[in-house]
Image (cartoon, coloured by chain):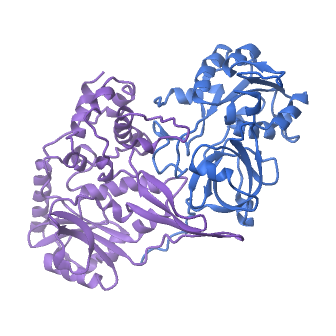
């Protein structure tokens, strides 16, 4: 693959062209926070800001979405569903950890036996343009999670900021829809040297490390450990760690409407809520914080690894930053390593 | 430009179905059997299942809940589900009338490993209204085209009171047959009861079915299952020859919504039928 480049003002011009036929999503400052949202003017984009509070997974797996409508009368029931996406979409400035997280969600929603048409249509219709992360935060531990500030996983196009321009790597056929490489200028050796420096500098900035070698086996021995009895104690069960997690995919399905007309909706759900597993009989296999925190940790660092060969965590640090009681997943893993 | 994607099946869409018959099973009127037929011929043509699989029944406006299929694939006609009235959806199912339209997704999950049962003696141990998919399994094995594929069939089935046993008419015909042994027990006998009295795990010890060339299938409330497994092991059944079917709260039924996992396996997708040997390798949850 030849490395290309695009000047920053040319990228804005390209976005202007795209806006005629594509839906364009990009990070935008809103009320003191970055949010990935649909834009109609490239001037509003802020590609070099901090990560968005809500990861871009919501563009593929929205917090709430209609699965189908139903209409029932004496002749029977009509069910209609339209998982189509009207227009092609591009998301610009996705953090590499968040792009990597999409590749993990693909494992779940593009399963061997069942595929999720809603998620997959959106994935197929959307080009993900990731941008190398120059300023990892103190809470970032992506490089411990098979990801990194310049991880290319899950990206269709990868950009590296080299000052006045970006080095462009078109990684997938989808990426070609956005940037036809033959139309882009080649990156010069100096450009590539600069890009390499940026990448190495970012990797050195990651100061936090989580020990993962052997963690699956360690957790296998830990199912009944006394650790689970106390480590959840300060958790208030708010679920923010799961809602803001770029890899969490749990959902609920509910009917809205009456018996004649309505819709079935799926909403994000959280393994940290007691209702999540409460059975009609009153029995709950995860009745307390002990089982619920264990489930979250085990799912991310043991079960998901067994199913898909990698952890369901990209080290983005959102669950650390936004936890109201400072329950830090890095400290949880440290505690696991020292626990019996 | 965009590659034209193959059309994928939408596993979230229920198939329209019609209520053909409803029947109150138990004396307390809390358990009802509903028989549903798929409305579209293409769905009927594609619906193939093995005993032990389940469906999600939609009562539109109320929601969806999972139920084991209580009829056997050898029985033509509507699909049968036996439902305990306990929550919103199950109460709505109890209120269904003949001709009502509902939705059905399935068959879901993995049923009983019939190929591993072939040529073996089969011991069914059951408690309460968990009997549904075991009833489907027995009906399948008793079918005249199938009976010779299996050895002796023993059914040990209990409920709290005689009035709480499911499918009583059919149980009576089983008791008359000489190609299976049926042991019915109740926790508390009443004047009408001439059968056994005692908890299912104790009756298993009393009946002491032979473990030679045999598989046992245990379904019931969690406490009954937990007490029955070690007794079967004492009788010589290997953990890989004991099976059960688990229940969990479920939503999607296809291993995506997250809640019904047992370790890295989803009860809806990899289960609901598991061997005792497999369960022993998974983290215990409850």
Where A264 falls versus A108 (above or below)? below
Q: Is residue B260 left or right of residue B69?
A: left
Q: Is residue A123 left or right of residue B163?
A: left
- Can see residue B56? no
Foreground pick, B136 / B216: B136
- Can see residue A235? yes
Please tell me in which quadrant of the rendered image residue A106 appears.
Answer: bottom left
* Residue B211 on image: x %, y %: 72, 19
* Residue A204 on image: x %, y %: 11, 48
* Residue A69 on image: x %, y %: 54, 69
Where A199 falls versus B130 (above or below)? below
Colour chain A is painted in = purple
Q: Is residue A312 left or right of residue B277?
A: left
Foreground pick, A296 / A314: A296
- Position of the N terminus of chain A, as image quadrant, is bottom left
Foreground pick, A256 / A138: A256
- Position of the C terminus of chain A, as image quadrant, is top left
Residue at x-position 30% and y-position 46%: A238
* Residue B193 on image: x %, y %: 82, 23
Where B258 falls versus A173 (above or below)? above
Residue at x-position 27% and y-position 70%: A37
Q: Which chain is blue?
A: B
The total of numbered circles placed on residues is 0
Q: Is residue A316 left or right of residue A311?
A: left
Where A62 falls versus A269 (above or below)? below
Residue at x-position 58% and y-position 23%: B226
Please tell me in which quadrant of the rendered image residue A177 appears.
Answer: bottom left
């Amino acid at each position: 693959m030849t490395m290309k480049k695009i000047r920053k003002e040319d990228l804005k011009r390209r976005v202007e062209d795209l806006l005629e036929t594509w839906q364009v999503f990009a990070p935008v400052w809103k009320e003191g926070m970055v949010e990935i949202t649909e834009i109609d003017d490239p001037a509003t984009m802020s590609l070099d800001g901090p990560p968005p509070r809500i990861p871009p997974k919501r563009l593929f797996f929205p917090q709430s979405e209609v699965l189908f409508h139903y209409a029932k009368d004496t002749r029977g029931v009509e069910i209609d569903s339209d998982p189509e996406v009207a227009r092609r979409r591009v998301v610009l400035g996705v953090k590499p950890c968040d792009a990597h997280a999409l590749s993990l969600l693909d494992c779940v929603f593009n399963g061997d036996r069942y595929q999720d048409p809603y998620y997959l249509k959106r994935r197929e219709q959307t080009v993900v343009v990731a941008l190398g992360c120059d300023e990892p935060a103190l809470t970032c531990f992506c490089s411990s999670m098979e990801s990194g500030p310049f991880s290319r996983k899950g990206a269709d196009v990868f950009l590296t900021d080299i000052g006045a321009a970006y080095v462009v790597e078109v990684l997938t056929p989808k990426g070609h829809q956005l940037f036809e490489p033959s139309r882009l200028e080649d990156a010069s050796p100096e450009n590539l040297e600069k890009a390499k420096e940026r990448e190495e500098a970012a990797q050195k900035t990651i100061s936090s490390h989580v020990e993962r070698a052997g963690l699956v086996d360690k957790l296998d021995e830990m199912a009944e450990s006394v650790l689970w009895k106390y480590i959840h104690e300060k958790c208030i069960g708010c679920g923010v760690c799961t809602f803001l997690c770029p890899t969490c995919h749990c959902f609920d399905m509910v009917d809205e409407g009456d018996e004649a007309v309505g819709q079935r909706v799926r909403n994000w759900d959280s393994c940290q809520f007691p209702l999540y597993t409460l059975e009609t009989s009153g029995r709950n296999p995860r009745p307390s914080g002990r089982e619920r925190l264990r489930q979250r940790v085990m799912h991310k660092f043991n079960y998901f690894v067994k199913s898909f060969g990698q952890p369901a965590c990209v080290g983005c640090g959102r669950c650390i930053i936004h936890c109201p009681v400072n329950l830090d997943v890095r400290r949880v893993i440290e505690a696991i390593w020292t626990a019996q | 430009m965009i590659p034209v994607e193959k059309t994928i099946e939408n596993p979230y869409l229920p198939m329209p179905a019609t209520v053909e018959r409803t029947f109150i099973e138990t004396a307390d009127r809390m358990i009802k059997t509903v028989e549903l037929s798929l409305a579209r011929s293409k769905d009927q043509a594609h619906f193939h299942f093995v005993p032990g699989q389940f469906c999600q029944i939609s009562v539109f406006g109320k929601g969806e809940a999972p139920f084991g299929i209580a009829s056997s694939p050898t029985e033509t006609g509507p699909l049968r589900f036996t439902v305990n009235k306990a929550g919103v959806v199950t109460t709505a199912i109890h209120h269904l009338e003949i001709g009502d339209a509902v939705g059905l997704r399935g068959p879901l999950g993995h049923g009983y490993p019939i190929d591993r049962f072939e040529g073996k003696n089969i011991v069914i141990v059951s408690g309460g209204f968990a009997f549904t998919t075991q009833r489907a399994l027995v009906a399948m094995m008793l079918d005249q085209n199938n009976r010779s594929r299996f050895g002796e069939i023993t059914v040990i089935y209990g409920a709290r009171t005689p009035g709480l046993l499911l499918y009583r008419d059919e149980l009576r015909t089983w008791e008359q047959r000489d190609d299976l042994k049926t042991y019915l027990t109740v926790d508390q006998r009443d004047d009408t009861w001439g059968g056994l009295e005692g908890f299912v795990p104790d009756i298993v010890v009393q009946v002491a079915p032979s473990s030679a060339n045999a598989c046992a299938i245990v379904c019931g409330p969690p406490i009954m299952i937990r007490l029955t497994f070690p007794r079967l092991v004492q009788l010589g059944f290997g953990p890989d020859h004991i099976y059960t079917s688990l229940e969990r709260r479920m939503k999607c039924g296809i291993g995506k919504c997250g809640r019904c996992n047992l370790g890295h396996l989803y009860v809806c997708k990899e289960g609901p039928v598991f061997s005792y040997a497999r369960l022993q390798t998974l983290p215990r949850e409850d």
